[in-house]
Amino acid sequence: MKLFDVYPINNINIVKGQGSLVWDANGTEYLDLYGGHAVISIGHTHPHYVERLENQLHQLGFYSNSIEIPLQQELATKLGHVSGKEDYQLFLINSGAEANENALKLASFYNGRKKVIAFRKAFHGRTSLAVAVTDNPKIVAPINETDNVIFLPWCDEAALEQAFADNKDQISSVIIEGIQGVGGIQVATESFLRKIRTLCDENNTVFIADSVQCGYGRTGKFYSHDFAGVDADIYSMAKGMGNGFPIGAISIAPKIKPAYFMLGTTFGGNHLACAAALAVLEVIEQDKLMQNAAEVGAYLISELNKFPEVKEVRGRGLMIGIDLPEELSHVKKELLFKHKIFTGEAKPNVIRLLPALNLSKAHADRFLEAFNTVLKASTVVSH
């Protein structure tokens, strides 16, 4: 049997990681500023994280949700405290797509409606409902197609108001990333997020804040939507939640009441996943990683804005998009293969930086120096 070929693969075999550094099978060191799609939140093989998981594995790796799992309540309490949403409820699953899938389903249970407002360039996952609200026809199979999704222009308040006016009492939820990741690090305006909150309140519609990539402290606040000063009804999360261990969740406002069997999961909230997630929150809190993300991120954004070759720098904290002209589309590849620095991308020419939240200023400078070298070499060649 061979692997189903769904990803273009770089010919690099990473075998070891520590903090923001990784090493390949040949012993070559790389600076990791992508963290496997924003997954590595507290650094590779963080000692506290390793110890938490190892200790739990020696006790019990898994049992089903048919029994008490005190770690789940411990995680819910800690997450409520660190996120500032202490009166919310927690449902644990395994991934970001599952989180959004369950958020959309729960919203529909809540108000009995079917229609969803989503936005251009949105990415919410690859499963049935999640991909239906994702603005990429290439990954939407015919079986996923539905007339229940209304795609609107990004941050267009007039279009949002019109959509509510045209679909009275039909809109179940509005789902929005606080910062679009795959869409190119597009930051939702605070006024737009407040407008969503107002219209949802007026129409008994559920506000779903997709925080899978832009949450968990990456922007300097726990959820990037928090910059708008309003609360969503459901927050979806995953990626950085487990620092590499598969775990996802939705945080649910008190007004949405549970009922037996409306949601369910086999692996969600298992003992190992909860141990991993607790370790992440403990490190974020103890090491003040949200503050570090805000400070090092602001430094990077400030320095990147000094490069005349860059069209635009977008983002908050350590979720940064560097928009380059087409003639510099090779920069990401050169950073990886010439300077041994992992970054991400968003089509067509945006470099995405999604490093661990404990990224040091020294490592930020290492990237800036390499970035400067690549741009200067490109300028010489073009002239």
Image: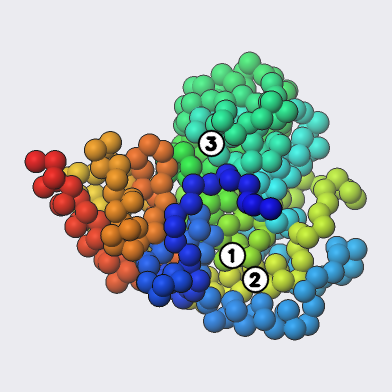
Is residue 220 visible in the rendered image? The answer is: no
Q: CA distance from mark 2 to mark 1?
A: 9 Å
Q: Secondary structure at mark 1?
A: loop
Task: Give the residue type that dot 1 points to.
Answer: Gly
- The answer to whether the residue labelled 2 contacts the one labelled 1, judged by CB atoms less than 8 Å apart, is yes
Q: Residues within 10 Å of mark 1 (few under 14, many from 20)?
A: many
Indicate which disc, 2 or 3, sits on the residue closer to the N terminus: 3
Whether pointer 2 and pointer 3 mark residues with C-beta atoms closer than 8 Å, the reply is no
Residue at the spot 9% in from the left edge and 41% down from the top edge: 383
Give the residue at mark 1. 244
Residue 314: image quadrant is top left
The amino acid sitting under disc 3 is: Ala
Q: Is residue 51 in sight in this rendering?
A: yes
Q: Which mark is residue 122?
A: 3
Mark 3: give few (<14), some (14-19) or many (20+) Cα within 10 Å: many
Give the residue at the far top of this rendering. 166
Q: Is residue 182 above or below residue 297?
A: above
Q: Earlier in the sequence, mark 1 or mark 3?
A: 3
| Residue at the (79%, 38%) spot, across then down | 110
Image check: 343 left or right of 109?
A: left
The one of 339 and 303 positioned closer to us in this rendering = 339
Residue at figure coordinates x 58%, y 57% from the top left: 239
Q: Nearer the viewer, mark 1 or mark 3?
A: 1
Q: Is residue 361 left or right of residue 132?
A: left
